Amino acid sequence: MRNLKGRLDLCSINTATLGHREPLSLTIDRIARAGFGGIAPWRHEVEKAVVAQIAKQIKALDLIVTGYCRSTYLPAATRSQWVANVNENKAALRDAATLGARCFVMVVGGLPEGSRDLSGAREQVSEGLAELLETARDCGVPLALEPLHPMYAADRSVLNTLAQALDICDALDRERSGFLGVAVDVYHCWWDPALRSSIAAAGEAGRIFAYHACDWLHQTRDMLLDRGMMGDGVVDLPAMRESVERAGYEGLVEVEIFSKENWWRRDPGEVLRTCANRLQTVV
Ligand code: ZN
């Protein structure tokens, strides 16, 4: 496993970690100044600015865009809404290309309102991904399917385990083109009894495109906005990174922490210093 001591160039900050409290251009400068090698911005902040300008700023600072967050949810109650969702993702993929993103993070969406048709929603996801894969190839930006913890199956993602994501990858991209893979997020995957074997299989297929780090707090108070700082929770982080890297992952370790009541209330500089410290000691 790589030693991250003195290697913040191997580490990236997902801008959500700072709570989206400042303009993106300021956040980009902060992350570069703190010595990190990468950044993962969100669409709602990029789309508020001029994409080409943001891309220029990021490139000038030599930051790697470890991922562009994230997709519009795919499943819809009507066919026309589904088409609109797919098209929004195509537009976002073009922005991801402008940013030079290593991947476009696919959070696929939950059940359409009023629906109880889980397998139907999953079919809509597969169909949408098949279409987006074409655009991804055209844009040169890989799709990283991010399985979310099953507690989000209703409202955010009907894709819930790495094994399920890999099945979709194999079905849609048998040739392993390099344009369809997964994002492994500690928060979503740490509990999975098949974690080790799924990570190994993903690596074997060359499909690990991103690794998102945080921690799972023993007493999680909010299932969306109470992620822990690395080292404050229950996840064996070195063991998890070891298995991801043993599987062949050579990309950056991206910190992604949603923490409304704790880290988002702290000074952004302090948050970045803490991330840097924990990355070099406990991840
Ligand atoms: Zn993530």
Image: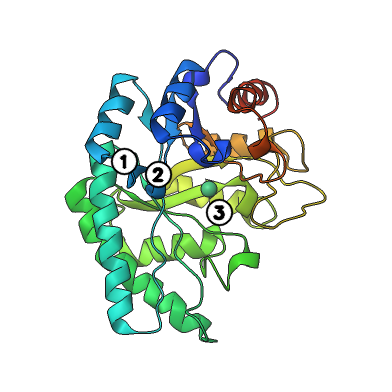
Residue drawn at x 30%, y 26% as measured from the top left: 57
Residue situated in front as seen by the camera: 125 or 16: 16
Q: Amino acid at mark 3?
A: Ser
Determine whether label 1 and label 2 are within 8 Å by CB.
yes
**For the view shown, which residue lies furthest in the left direction?**
138
Q: Dot 1: what SS?
A: loop
- Crowding around mark 1 (Cα neighbors within 10 Å: few <14, some 14 to 19, many 20+) is some
Q: Dot 2: what SS?
A: helix
Per the rendering, the mark at residue 82 is none
> CA separation, marks 1 and 2?
7 Å
Residue denoted by label 1: 49
**Left or right of 184 in this view: 44:** left
| Mark 1 / mark 3, whichever is N-terminal | 1
Mark 3 CB lies closer than 8 A to ligand 1? no
Q: Nearer the viewer, mark 1 or mark 3?
A: 1
Q: Amino acid at mark 1?
A: Ala
Q: Amino acid at mark 2?
A: Glu
Residue denoted by label 2: 45
| Corner quadrant of residue 120 | bottom left
Mark 1 CB lies closer than 8 A to ligand 1? no
